[in-house]
């Protein structure tokens, strides 16, 4: 059997059968794993209270009760919390983009003694699970008097993130050095090379960094739980956690709130997934 | 600024290099290395946060290992969870990636959908699962009842609470699958062609080509999922509170309670160090075992 590009020949029957089988399996899995849970959450969010507890179960909300959302929003200032979350996420994006590009550039392009050792150290920190650092960091922020403010949630991003530095460094390594050298011959300084040549070419890894930073910060629960005490300063996740206590069995309202909480990351994800899945697969990462 | 001072180009480049990496280096010292060592010292103290720490030597560690039944319970819970969720996640992730590697119509949509749970985490998802697995009105037990099975009490049953958390983690299997998929797509097609010429069927190809070529990726995922198992927190905090009957007293949650509910920071620091040692130990073990089963191409580009 000589190798041939399959698409130029009619597919054999067994191949076609496999394709149909795989397609059906994936469809069934997607329905069961993604469709059912998210659909159930969304449908519940529009139901009346009596319909949640009905037997036999009522699948479609009738009537559709939009009021669930306004009920939740009057009980818990989720819009306010969303702004807080957004603020923290944007500051982290700014911090990460600033610091990670610079550090990655230095590691990728500049020669200095100890560079390889330091880069190995950076890679080693990638292996340190975040939760080990939870308590030690709290102690530092406690000593600095930052507990109760947003500073512990924002400031570290300005000192870079090992994962994003690694991602960008790998990307910069693929940019031909000829570009730098041509600019240097024209008298460009290192800063010029960084800001005028490398940075404009780094848009794809910067996109991945920005999107992931947003998603991580939006979904983060433990850090805000530890550092934020003021109700007005709550993030979305802290607010959603209060839903449970407030509406003990009003699952329609709880699901309405939860649905509101997942809409921003879901929308962002669907717009950015082209960048994201490629970028993630290339370096190996999961959320 | 540096341009005005006359420096040898190599010296200037070195200075610029250090300046460039300085944010990370300073951050590493302040937010990682420093706190890490400080917490080791604190683990030998009694520190109730409001009063200054007092040196107590090995007291915290002695108390943890001999007088704290919750510590052993949290170890049991965490390791049972690892034993349950790790093989499940590895196998399911691998299986899903094999499906996703097959060219079918709408592939982009499938990949996007299966990865969705990874970007939706946090409290919303915990609440969603709490409702899905509601013993009386949740969709899981509703569907089970339709086929005549009486569903369990899930998070509210001491026997089922831990498997329920594992089930929740399986929802994010798309994250692992995407990584396996990248590994699968790096396998050179000529290996499959050669195997076909030798008369290998689909199973033989999986066993003798796919799995060996994928072993570095599997190895990477094994380490990552191991670390993940020690991170379980939000689900426990939001859904079960460690119960019922301490059945979901995960290590992370147990440590959190010691630190931020009992404010016993010295004790919690000792717990953090024990966790660090366990994770490092297991990671080392996985690394040490890798020559036995991880296959690297001798002239491969490396990953």
Image (cartoon, coloured by chain):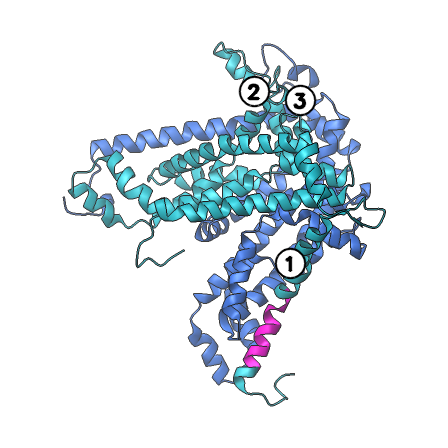
State the mark number for residue B71. none
Q: Which residues are magenta?
A: B12-23
- Above or below, comparing residue B44 to residue A261 in the picture: below
Where residue B230 sits in the image (x, y, percent)?
A: 58, 39
Point out the frontmost of discs 1 and 2.
1
Q: Is residue B233 left or right of residue B294?
A: right
Quarter of the figure with residue B271: top right
Q: Which residue is more in the foreground, A156 or A71? A: A156
Residue B16 on the magenta span: yes
On the image, numbered disc 3 is attached to which residue?
Answer: B245
Tint applied to chain A in the drawing: blue
Q: Secondary structure at mark 3?
A: loop
On the image, numbered disc 2 is attached to which residue?
Answer: B139
Disc 2 crowd, CA 10 A, few/some/many (<14, 14-19, 20+): many
Figure quadrant of the N terminus of chain A: top left
Tint applied to chain B in the drawing: cyan
Q: Is residue A8 visible?
A: no
Toward the left, the furthest residue is A1
For the stretch drawn in magenta, the main secondary structure is helix
Disc 3 crowd, CA 10 A, few/some/many (<14, 14-19, 20+): few
- Dot 2 falls on which chain? B
Residue located 59% across and 71% down the image: B20
Residue located 59% across and 73% down the image: B18
- Above or below, comparing residue B170 to residue A123 in the picture: above
On the image, numbered disc 1 is attached to which residue?
Answer: B33
Q: Which residue is more in the foreground, B270 or A189? A: B270
Q: CA distance from mark 1 to mark 2?
A: 47 Å
């Amino acid at each position: 059997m000589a190798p041939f590009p399959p698409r130029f020949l009619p597919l054999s029957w067994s191949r076609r059968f496999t394709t149909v089988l795989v397609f059906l399996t994936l469809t069934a899995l997607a329905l069961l794993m993604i469709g059912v849970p998210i659909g159930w959450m969304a449908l519940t969010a529009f139901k009346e209270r009596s319909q949640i507890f009905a037997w036999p179960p009522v699948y479609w909300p009738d009537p559709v009760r939009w009021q669930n959302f306004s009920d939740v929003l009057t009980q818990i200032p989720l819009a306010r919390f969303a702004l807080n979350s957004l603020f923290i996420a944007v500051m982290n994006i700014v911090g990460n983009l600033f610091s990670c590009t610079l550090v990655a550039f230095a590691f990728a392009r500049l020669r200095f003694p100890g560079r390889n050792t330091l880069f190995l150290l950076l890679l080693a920190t990638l292996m340190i699970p975040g939760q080990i650092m939870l308590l030690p960091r709290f102690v530092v922020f406690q000593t600095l008097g930052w507990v109760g403010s947003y500073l512990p949630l924002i400031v570290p991003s300005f000192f870079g993130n090992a994962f994003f530095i690694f991602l960008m460094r790998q990307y910069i390594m693929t940019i031909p050095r000829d570009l730098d050298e041509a600019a240097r011959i024209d008298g460009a300084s290192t800063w010029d090379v960084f800001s005028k040549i490398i940075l404009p070419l780094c848009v794809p890894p910067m996109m991945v960094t920005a999107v992931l930073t947003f998603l991580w910060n939006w979904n983060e629960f433990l850090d805000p739980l530890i550092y934020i005490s003021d109700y007005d300063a709550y993030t979305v996740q802290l607010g959603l956690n209060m839903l449970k206590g407030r509406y003990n069995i009003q699952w329609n309202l709880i699901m309405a709130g939860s649905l509101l909480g997942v809409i921003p990351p879901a929308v962002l994800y669907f717009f950015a997934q082209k960048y994201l899945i490629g970028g993630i697969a290339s370096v190996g990462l999961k959320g | 600024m540096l341009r005005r001072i006359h420096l040898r180009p190599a010296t200037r480049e070195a200075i610029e290099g250090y300046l460039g990496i300085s944010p990370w280096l300073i951050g590493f010292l302040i937010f990682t290395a420093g706190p890490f060592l400080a917490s080791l010292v604190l683990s030998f103290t009694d520190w109730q946060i409001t009063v200054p720490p007092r040196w107590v030597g090995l007291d915290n560690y002695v108390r943890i290992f001999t007088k704290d039944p919750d510590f052993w319970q949290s170890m049991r819970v965490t390791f049972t969870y690892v034993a349950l969720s790790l093989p499940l996640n590895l196998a399911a992730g691998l299986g899903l990636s094999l499906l996703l590697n097959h060219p079918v119509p709408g592939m982009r949509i499938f990949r996007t959908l299966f990865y969705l749970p990874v970007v939706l985490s946090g409290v919303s998802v915990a609440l969603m699962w709490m409702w899905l697995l509601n013993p009386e009105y949740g969709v899981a037990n509703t569907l089970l009842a339709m086929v005549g099975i009486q569903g369990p009490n899930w998070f509210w049953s001491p026997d089922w609470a831990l498997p329920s958390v594992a089930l929740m983690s399986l929802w994010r299997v798309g994250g692992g699958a995407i990584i396996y998929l990248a590994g699968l797509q790096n396998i050179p097609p000529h290996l499959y062609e050669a195997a076909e010429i030798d008369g290998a069927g689909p199973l033989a190809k999986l066993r003798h080509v796919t799995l060996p070529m994928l072993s570095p990726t599997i190895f990477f995922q094994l380490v990552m999922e191991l670390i993940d198992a020690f991170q379980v927190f939000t689900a426990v905090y939001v859904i079960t509170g460690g119960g019922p009957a301490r059945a979901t007293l995960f290590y992370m949650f147990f440590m959190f309670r010691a630190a931020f509910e009992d404010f016993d920071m010295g004790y919690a620091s000792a717990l953090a160090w024990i966790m660090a040692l366990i994770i490092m130990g297991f990671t080392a073990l996985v690394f040490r075992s890798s020559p036995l089963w991880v296959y690297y191409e001798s002239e491969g580009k490396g990953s």
